[in-house]
Amino acid sequence: MKTSTKLALLSSLYLSQGLPFGFFTQALPVLLRKQGLSLPAIGLAHLLALPWALKFLWAPLMDRYGSRHWGRRRGYILPLQCLSTGLLLSLALPEGGPGTPLLLAAVLGVNLLAATQDVSTDGLAVELLAPAERGWGNGVQVAAYRVGMIVGGGLMLAVFDAVGWRPTLVTLGALLLAATVPIALYREPPSEPPPAQSLGLAWWLKRPGALAWLTLLVVYKAGEALATGMLRTFLVDSGLTLTDIGWMLGGVGFTAGLVGALLGGGLVTRLGRRRALLVFGAIQAGAVLLYALVARGGPASLPLLTLTCAVEHVASGMATAAVFTAMMDACRPEHAATDYTVQASLVVLATGGAAAVSGFSASSLGYSTHFALSAALCVAGTLYAALTFHPPRTLSPEAAPEVSS
């Protein structure tokens, strides 16, 4: 399969995950804040993304068992995306939109479906991409996911502001259905499942250097997640309208996130994994610090907030592409879904936990100090990477490329 074809297929799959997740993580906090919910309550709503942190529990079963007819990975991805589409469209049925309990239950349901789909998608990505393609592959992955999040969050927020619940949810479901077409047309080559042994977190903990590497995954993105967990409420409290926030995240965020992910993915191979993590981590810390400076100066203008948002999206896309590429290098091809999922679950657990407590931090410290603390955590994560970066090799060292640079 051509590299361009691989990247197009993976783009559609990660876009599919980003669409509903973006709506529930970016648009929902704004809507809840407009309804008067407290910052701690909104922060705790991030716990509904718990399936993303727990997916490593069922990943070994998905690695081991799959459909021979539909494909070992495709046999999971296709029905799960169809179920997600159906769930989103069903939310459009109640007149006037779903109530808050139903909406929160749907958030949990969509997260469960998307997180499970992500296990097979990540496994498919590791299998499809050669080591030389992984930089661009992860750049495209992050870019497509961010595009999905921005469209599902920022753009759908603007649509909601204009036409309300039902058209917004129907549009979101239709977009997800359209993004399902490439995987429906894809024919996955047959592959044998791996042996039952050596699956899961227990195997990881036996690898030399694994503890330091897994700790790095926990700390590297936590500072940024602490900051962005309160970004939408900060914009609301800065006086921006739903349309302003929607177009800032949907227009500026779309473009900046896309540029950052593709730029980071293209530079990872050139800079090397370690140098990319350090450079992009430092840029990420500086971008988060900009939020602290903007918040400290009192009510900020829309152009200044827009510029700050753009810088942060570029930096985040670059840093994410770097860490995802290193994660992919550390996977065994025959256990790709499980190995990648264990790492991704730790990242989600760390970022989700940081987002969950972000409301308490912002409420107690104020936005400016909250963002400054987040920037300090970004610096700490980057320094830890500088001191410890040397991810564990695959099970067969002779077949694994050197990850450090």
Image: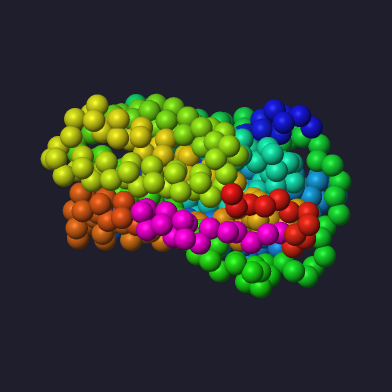
The quarter of the picture where the N terminus appears is top right
Q: Position of residue 54 (x, y in %)?
A: 56, 63
Kindly report the secondary structure that dominates the magenta region of the rendered protein: helix
Number of numbered discs on residues = 0
Q: Position of residue 118 (x, y in %)?
A: 62, 49
Instruction: State the residue at coordinates (53%, 66%).
Output: 212
Looking at this view, is 150 or 106 the one in front? 150
Q: Position of residue 384 (x, y in %)?
A: 44, 60
The answer to whether residue 100 shows anywhere in this view is no
On screen, 41 above or below 260? below
Instruction: State the residue at coordinates (34%, 30%).
Output: 248
On screen, 215 above or below 221? below
User: Is 79 within the magenta?
Assistant: no
The answer to whether residue 331 shows anywhere in this view is yes
The stretch of residues the image draws in magenta is: 378-394
Residue farthest toward the front in the current orientation of the protein: 405
What is the quadrant of residue 254 in the picture?
Answer: top left
User: Is 392 within the magenta?
Assistant: yes
148 to the left or right of 99: right
Instruction: State the residue at coordinates (14%, 37%).
Output: 299
